[in-house]
Each structure stands twice: as C-alpha cells, then as structure tokens.
Image (cartoon, rainbow, N blue to C red):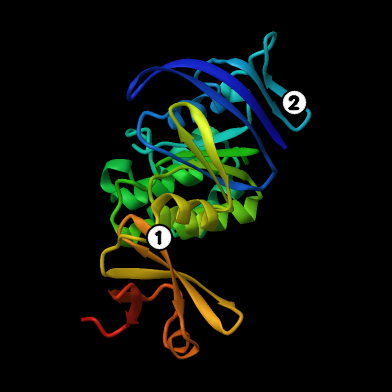
Amino acid sequence: MIDVDIKKKLHGSIGGMMLKIKVSIKERDFVAVFGESGSGKTTFLRILAGLEKSDGQIKVGNEIWQNSKKFLPPQKRKIGFVFQDYALFPNMSIEENLFFVSKDKNLANELLEITQLQELKDRLPNTLSGGQKQRVALIRAMMNKPKLLLMDEPLSALDPKMRLRLQQDILLLHKKFETTTIFVSHDPSEIYRLANRVVVINHGNIIDDGAPKKILLRITGSQKFSFIGEVLDITKVDVVYIAIISIGQQIVEIVMSPNEAKNIKIGQKISVSTKAFNPTLNTNFV
C-alpha cells in the first residue's frame, strides 16, 4: 500500500495554489492521473519520485519515504520514471543505457526481447524512431525492478499506431513485473485501456477518484461526438449490449441490439451517427 498525504505551494495555470494530495494506492494498481494542464499532476509525480520536496508524509508498505524528519533521496526509493522526452544518454547505446541503471544482463536481455529491441541494442538513441526511444526509456525504468513506476505523459508525442503498440508493452510489463504504476495522461482511450483507477486533479486537489468507465463517461460526456470512433469494450446488460467507444478526445456509451453486437468487435473502427438522439453504428463507412 502507498499512502500519500502531502502539501506544496505551487504557481499553477491560474496563479498561486496549494497542491494537497491525500490518497492510498494498492500494490499492483495501475492508476491514471487526469486533469487540466497546470493542475499539479507532474509535480505530484516528482514528489513521489523524490525529485521535489513537500510537506507531509509518503509511506510505501512499512517504509517511510518522507515525513517531517526523513526524506529518502530518489536513488533509494526503488522507483522507475518514464519522462515524456525520453531522457536517454545520447552517447550510450541502448544496452549501455540499461546497464547504467543495473548490470543485470539477464534482465536486460529479457526486457529487450519483450519490447523487440534485441537487434537494436548496440545502436545510439539518435538513430532510433520516437517509438523505439520510448520503449528504451520504458525498459530502462524497469531495470531496477521498481516498486513504483511513474510515467509522465510518456506517449503524447507518438502517432496513434505507435501509441497503441507502446500501451500494450506498458501493460505487459506492468503485469509481468507486478509493479504499482502511476501515469499522467490526457487521452481518455489510453486511460481506459491501461488503468484500473483514475484520480482527477483540479487546481491542486483531487476532485474525483474511481473506475475509468465511471470517471471518464462523467468527465467527457456523451452528448457531443465526432463520427468515427474505436470500440474499446462491449458488455451485455439484460437483453441489450453496451459499447464503449472512443471518439476523438471523448468516450461515449452506446446501446446496441444483439444483431449489431454480432458484427462489431473490440478494437474495430466504426462510424457513429445519430437521428433524433438515437445512435446508429455502421462498420461500412469507407
């Protein structure tokens, strides 16, 4: 269990504010932190990592990471941190970047195999694509087998296809190494695919906390949408089916008939149209 009760004065998007976070996170949870820019999300991660100081307490299991008398430095917190800008050492090969964290060659080979980077291990970062660099950053963060993996919008600079690939890698590593993962994202579909819990921060305070489906439908709403979407989930409720669909930056919930459900699969691109507020789904839109 990770217990956080911290305060820190910040200069946010609308001026000075107090970041006040009190939250408990279970081991092996995958928690998304969601909110507007300047609300304190990145600072929260940096405080957890020990990169910034704050008032209050952070306790991980039976170990105190910080309180009024103690402040554990980042290198002793057993964390992995994946930044948006990769933060790789440009003069080191992929393999050397990994060994900078730990000399565990077996673990390095395992991580390279999982992310299909084995054949690129001798290359320098500047010869890699953005997706490859972010995969290196991800597995480098896993080299010390962290108790806590922190990710600050790690996929925001990637194209949709590569984002989906990296999401799969992140989820695989999270489950395989049984880490507790906290990541910042502005992408509702990304959050829905990865997280089992969403914490919403606004102006330094937690204003909502719960399951992705519950939180995201409430935040993004289903009253406005574009027309092409991706099916994230399909569930049966009594005699009808409910489809969760990502449309642009929104997630909507749409009722389907059994016949519609037979022809639609999770991950499929579909068109969504409405007439008299009754949505119609169509897979033949090209």
Image position of 216 (left or right of 107): left
Find residue 283 and report its image quarter: bottom left
Find residue 53 and report its image quarter: top right
User: Nearer the observer, disc 2 or disc 1?
Assistant: 1
Q: Is residue 34 above or below residue 254?
A: above
Circle 2: residue type:
Glu
Within 10 Å of disc 1 (Cα), the crowding (few <14, some 14-19, many 20+) is many
Instruction: Please tell me which of labels 2 and 1 falls first in the chain.
Output: 2
Judged from the image, the secondary structure of the residue bearing numbered disc 1 is strand
Q: Nearer the viewer, residue 132 or 272?
A: 272
- Mark pair 2, 1: CA separation: 39 Å
Q: Is residue 30 above or below residue 2?
A: below
Residue, x 41% and y 64% (percent of image)? 252
Residue 45 makes an appearance in the image? yes
Find residue 69 and report its image quarter: top right
Residue 24 in percent (x, y) is at 67, 36
Q: Is residue 208 above or below residue 48?
A: below
Q: Nearer the viewer, residue 249 or 241?
A: 241
Circle 1: residue type:
Ile
Q: Which residue is mark 1?
A: 251
Q: Is residue 246 above or below residue 242?
A: above
Image position of 224 (left or right of 114): left
Q: Which residue is mark 2?
A: 63
